[in-house]
Structure formats: C-alpha cells, structure tokens
Image: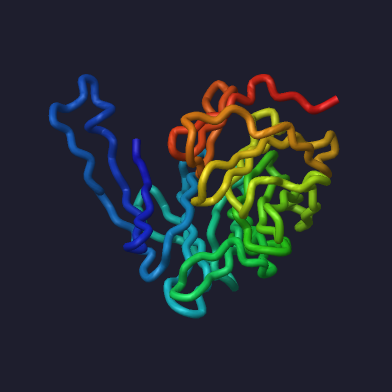
Amino acid sequence: GKVYAAGLTTGDVWVFDLAAFTADPPAAGAVVKPVATVSFASHRVVGLEVAPDGSAVYAAGTFRLTPYKGKVIKIDPATNKVVGEVQLPAAVGVLRLSPDGKMLAVGEQPVAARGEFAPNQLVPSQIQVIDVGTWAKGKPIPLPAGVGDVRFVTDTTAVAVAAAAQGCKVFTVDVAAGTAVDATPEAGVTVPYAGSAVVTADGKVVVVTRLNMGAGAEVLVPSTDGKKMTSVGSGAASPAGGVSGPVAVSPDGKHVLLGAGATIDVSAVKPPE
C-alpha cells in the first residue's frame, strides 16, 4: 500500500511505498523513502484525505504569502499528478472528506502577522464545500469565527467547532443545504479555544479538545434532532498533563485518543436523563 504525508514546511506531499514492510517476511533493514513528491509549492499543507475507493487523494493548503488564500488539489494516485484544483477566497486550516467520498468540507482560519494561523480570532469565517464529482464549490457555510475543526457525522451532516469570546462554540452543519445551527450547551463549552473534534461511529458523542494548549477535553452528547449539545463531563484522561488535538476514535469505538497519549473512555457515555 501507499502512505501520503504532508510536508508542512516544504509545501510538498510525499508518497511512500510500504511494500518493504508488508512483504512476508518483511525485508531485513527495510527503510521507507518517498517514491514520489507532489509539489504544493509555497503552500502550508493543512490536510490530506483519500477517497474511499482509493481513486483520488485530496490536499488543502494555504499560500504562505499575503493574501494567504487557500487551495485544494486533487491527486491521481496512479500517476501522482495533480489533476484538479480549486482556489479558495481565504486561508484554510482543516480538510475533511464525507464518508461516501462525494464532498469535501474545508474550514477557513484567520491568519495573523507573518502568516501564522490564528484560529481563535473572532473573525467571521466559512466552511467551503466542494463537490468532488463536479469539482464545483457549493454554498459557503458562515461561522462567527475561525473554524477549529469539521467532522462529518453522516454523508451530508457534520459537526464544526469555532472560537468564541468564552471557550468555543459547537455547530451542527447541514453540508448539503449550506446551513449551520449553534448547538453549544446553554452553559457553554468550558474547553477554551477552538480545537479539534471527533464523532463516534454512533454519532452521539463529540469530544472537543484544547488547541496546542494545556489539558482540556469535553464530552458532548447531541439531542435527538442534533440541534443542541449537552455536556456530560470531561471524561477520564491520562496521563496527567497536557492534551491536545488531533483526536481519533479507537477501532472498537470505546476510547477517544488525544494528543500526548491521553485517552477518554466513552464506552459508557449516555445522554443525561
């Protein structure tokens, strides 16, 4: 198989062939080296996604110089050539592909001095939607601040995290309709700053983590209609100390994995009565 990796400082996407490791028996002294490089020149690569059928690889990046606009490219894995691209109106910081592989959601993030991302600035931002079949942009979805993360729940719905004056806000997003509803708990989200999010396979639990800061994670349970979240606590994270994104769900769906080796057991999480 192949592995695609983004070079944050080089603006490249590297392609690695894992044949040496998957051989039976594995080749002695095997070393993985790039077999191809796809140039994303002068862009900071912020996300990679692979089509479910392996027919395409998508990458999103932000131009390193003013006016810091974003771009999404489509790579043909058979040739490792760029076969499509979409220019975006603002800097982007996150890329997600829908489970059916038909839509891309690209979250904008404000840029501060010297081109550094500033996702916690309260600057109106958007989720850009791209139909990968027609390679056309859909209706942009406005959010009140920089988009910390977007995670698909179904083929056409998602959860998004954005910065807020206190903590952050969580939105349920209808990607097909181009709308977002503020689903933040009435008491707010105690985790400060717009961080990463993850949705379990049953679509019920969202964990929002602090972005590149100290400890902080919160478990939220959506209402039946998805229009409101309820906080059910921070869970049991270990080891003690800082946790941050990115986050993922374990294969058995029982644990959420955070940065720095922290874990949260979500197997017993239930909506409050």
Compared with residue 108, is residue 5 higher up or lower down, i.e. above or below? Answer: above
Looking at the picture, tell me which residue is in the foreground, 94 or 59: 94
Q: Residue at x 29, y 44 (%)?
A: 16
- The answer to whether one can see residue 253 in this image is no
- The answer to whether one can see residue 174 in this image is yes
Q: Where on the picture, by quarter, is residue 203?
A: top right
Compared with residue 27, is residue 150 higher up or lower down, i.e. above or below? Answer: below
Looking at the picture, tell me which residue is in the foreground, 69 or 125: 125
Q: Residue at x 36, y 68 (%)?
A: 41
User: The C terminus lies in which quarter of the figure?
Assistant: top right
* Rendering coords of residue 98 (x, y %): 62, 45
User: The N terminus lies in which quarter of the figure?
Assistant: top left
**Colouring convention used in this rendered image of the protein:** rainbow
Q: Residue at x 64, y 36 (%)?
A: 199
* Rendering coords of residue 250 (x, y %): 52, 27
* Rendering coords of residue 138 (x, y %): 69, 62
Q: Residue at x 68, y 50 (%)?
A: 160
Q: Where on the picture, by quarter, is residue 134?
A: bottom right
Q: Is residue 146 left or right of residue 7?
A: right
Report the label total.
0
Looking at the picture, tell me which residue is in the foreground, 271 or 178: 271
Question: Which residue is outermost to the bottom?
Answer: 66
Q: Is residue 98 left or right of residue 222?
A: left
Question: Which residue is outermost to the front?
Answer: 240
Q: Is residue 236 left or right of residue 60?
A: right
Q: Is residue 208 left or right of residue 69?
A: right
